[in-house]
Amino acid sequence: DGISRYTTELGNALAKLTDVTFIISNPGQLNFLPRKAKHVHIHAPESVYEPFTARILNQYRPDVVYSPMQTMGSIGRHYKLILSLHDMIYYRHRTPPRYLSAPVRFGWRLFHATYTPQRFVLNNADAVVTVSQTTKNEFIKTRLTKRPIIVIPNAPQRFTSHKVSHETEIKNIVYMGSFMRYKNVEALIAAMEWLPGKTLHLLSRITPVRRKELQKMIPKEADVRFYGGVSDDQYQALLANNALLATASFDEGYGIPVAEALAMGVPAAVSDIAIFHEVAGAGAIYFDPTKPQNIAEQIRILDDPVERDLCIEQGRAHIATYTWKSSAKQLLDVIKSLV
């Protein structure tokens, strides 16, 4: 998921700049970290021990602990602490991820019922990180924390294995993301009524119940394909094959798939929301996510080779300003300021 990728990429980039000891909860996580990375093994973030994390970490005498999430317990800590909150989506869409256990989902709903618990958690840190200026503005507007808020943005993976090709008209529409309600995949499916000859590829894992629900919405004769999960190589191959990246999400913390597509030289058609304007700039076509016909109309703009090439050029230039090395340097500056 997005937070896992953010953690991995930022952590690897930071380890090239300074001495890092990684906190893991599963030995399999070492496969995504630098070879022979120093690490400590503690409980998982959803464990009942999470509120007592500080007492566990004190024994290792860290200077600064950086958490890519905000749930890490801070009571009794003897070190500087930086917490991260990627977005405020779950205050507007309070359904928790289904992979969480029932007790954790119940606690999740209670936690997001008001801003008070979040304020308490964030104010117990020394600094708070988020991934976009859009989200930082939301923190300020809601007075979510008294601590300094620093933007350490995401950056795209650099896909290079497949050469991007485009014909006169785009044939493939690629969606990468979850199928939660606020992602509004229903609108992309409905838009296929006005996009004959094109195929919508839904790449992510999906529950059987949700899949059946969405399959019932597919317009007659529309070509919509469910993959149930793909590898990075399959993902890249689909993007490279005369495609555009599309998302009709009502809300987003950042939009890593959009950034990945732009970096690869693939145009994007996305919801007209603030975060996508921040991430994509002039490198995307924007549509009203509540109107499937408008989605289709905007997507068809990218069938024009001139419009498409301009979009790709502007997208590449814009996303080039985001790199993991730059983000790691920003994080290191915050760490140094605390010690």
Image (cartoon, rainbow, N blue to C red):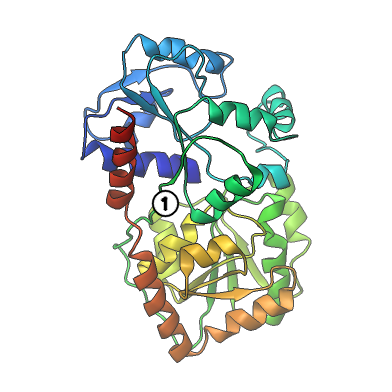
The residue that appears at 50% across and 90% down in the rendered structure is 304
Question: Which residue was labeled with disc 1?
Answer: 154
Residue 195: tell me if it is visible: no
**Quadrant of res 234:** bottom left
- SS at circle 1: loop
Instruction: State the residue at coordinates (27%, 50%).
Output: 325
The x and y percentages for residue 220 are 76, 74
Q: Residue at x 70, y 81 (%)?
A: 194
Q: Tell which of 3 and 28 is nearer to you.
A: 3
Q: Amino acid at mark 1?
A: Asn
Disc 1 crowd rating (10 Å Cα; few below 14, some 14-19, many 20+) is: many
Q: Nearer the viewer, residue 210 or 64?
A: 64
Question: Is 89 placed left or right of 316 in the picture?
Answer: right
In x, y percent, where is residue 235? Answer: 44, 59
Answer left or right for 225 relative to 35: right
Residue 118 lies, with reference to residue 215, above or below; the image says above
Query: In the rendering, at what x and y percent does residue 276 appear?
Result: 54, 64
Is residue 269 placed above or below 145 in the rendered structure? below
